[in-house]
Amino acid sequence: MRGAGPRNGGDLVVETLEALGAKTVFGIPGQHALGLFDAMGRGSLSFVSSRVENNSAFAADGYSRATGEVGVLFLSTGPGALTSLAGLQEAYATGVPMVVIASQIPLEGLGARRKGMLHQLDDQKASAANVTKSQRLIQHASGIPSAIQDAWTDAISSPQGPVWVEIPQNVLLDPVMVPPVEDALAEAADNPPRVELVREAVNWLRGARRPAIIAGGGTRRGHAEASLRRLAEQLRAPVICTPGGKGAFPWEHPLSLQSWIEDRHMTEVLEDADVLVVVGSSLGEVTSNYFTFEPRGRIIQIDAEPRVLESNRPGLGIRADAGQALAALETALAAPPAGTAASAGPGAAPDWHGRTPEEVVAEALGKVRARLESQDLAKELAFMADVRAAVPDDMQTFWDMTISAYWAWSCWDSREGQFHSAQGAGGLGFGFPAAIGGAVGLATLGRPARVLAVSGDGSAMYSIAELATARQHNVPVTWLIVDDGGYGILREYMVDAFGKATATELARPDFVALAESFGVPARRVPVEGVRQALEESLAADGPNVVVVETLLKMFAPTHLG
């Protein structure tokens, strides 16, 4: 029983995490971290053992995205810690709350005194500084509960993100006199908009005739979907979602420009807005159609991360949580202007040069369809439609950086499910391990746990070892691998730019035989058979793999020439 026998620093870690509400931990055991893993045996935390630390980070990320809870990751010192950094970059770029507990060499080796200890680094937490919100080194066991509680608070406070806590080996292993942790409280710091900025934004919106909204990933992280819809309907403003914001606004809504953010027809609509509200987006490379976006109106930019504000376009920058900011705008717009007896409401009726906003939306979507239909993309359009038809409306999906995902950024209707991709940092290998974490998290909450992961053959090889994890824990993940024999998008980029591709072709395994060697059922189907194969696989138990050998093309870019 807890507290009945000798306890150490590892027990304090586990007890604090349990008190904060953690249920599941991802990671890989290591020599300096053994105190953590020994203590887990005396607690109630469930552990999911990955095969590569980077994939452990992706899994903790996927757990958090799927559940809305904090992902927890245990890492060993040196190589183990460093191997996780690319996965943490994705979580940091996308604003995913995670608490990372990394072991350290014993205290006497710290401070770059080169004792030649195993896994020794000059300053391990400095390596994490680029990919985490905050970093802490705990040197005394009594400081463990408060430090982890503070780190958890950092992780859940907007802008959310991963935080790093490292604890030396002997601090984890040495006996402690600190009593068992009974409670721990971490509350997100408040991040409301400034009153005068809300007032100015409302003044702009009241006078707008052509308002429009870009909903980025911060809209979803701030749980601002309901406020976004009400605000858009108040203003009758067209709304487009970025890849990270996908699902923040109903796909089939009359004001929805959906997610065709990389199409010039959409760029033109947004450029014509006289007031553009940008929520939870930096107006970065993809969102600005590769920096070709030249707005003619004024911009109101809302983001929890102050460094994002006006980083790409001047405007009225409002540092705030998206949910709090949109709720404030919505309330202020509904009230009569100060000092007047005017009726409540946004102001002048929308007028897009004699057209209604709903007509503008329908026309823009029609132009996008016509552009796609004018290209040789029948196979790609049918493939994406078949995948969408096979996936239940409420199922969460996890997409790697692959041609299928680039299509999905634009054309995937997430419906009641959530769409997750690695567009934050853009690294390979996210899809399958993140889906494992997502499925584990959903099962922990007692919700339907089957999820879909989508990878290319190149990105699949980054996380192929996690077939063992999926089998060991019997995780209900269906993994769709689109095998085109290489890094397909890089091949396409190079051929377009240079007339030929170099170093993009790959010798790859027989994915079906490889999955079966792990004890994971797998099948290979032609591109026309993907819908039936997915429907059957998604209805099965445990992990399974569907392989489609085909070459998919991207739609023609509109930011070039």
Image (tube, grey):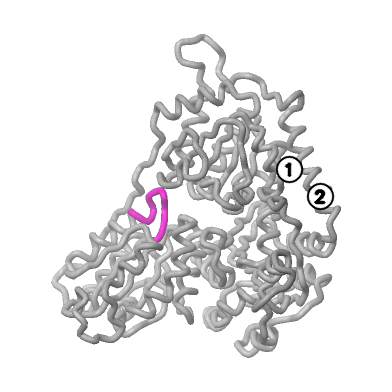
Q: Tell me: residue 378, above or below residue 455.
A: above
Say if residue 7 shows up in the picture.
no
**462 horizontally vs 9: left or right:** right
- The residue where tag 2 is placed is 371
- Residue 496 image offset from top left, x and y in percent: 73, 64
The three-letter code of the residue at mark 1 reads His
Residue 361 sits inside the magenta stretch: no
- SS class, disc 2: helix
Tags 2 and 1 in contact by the CB under 8 Å rule? yes
Residue 290: image location, x then y, percent: 62, 51
* Residue lying at 48% horizontally and 64% vertically, measured from the top left: 61
Let me know if residue 155 is in the magenta part. yes
3 vs 94, left or right, is left
Residue 295 occupies quadrant: top right
The x, y position of residue 188, in whole percent, is: 36, 48
Q: Mark 1 points at which residue?
A: 265
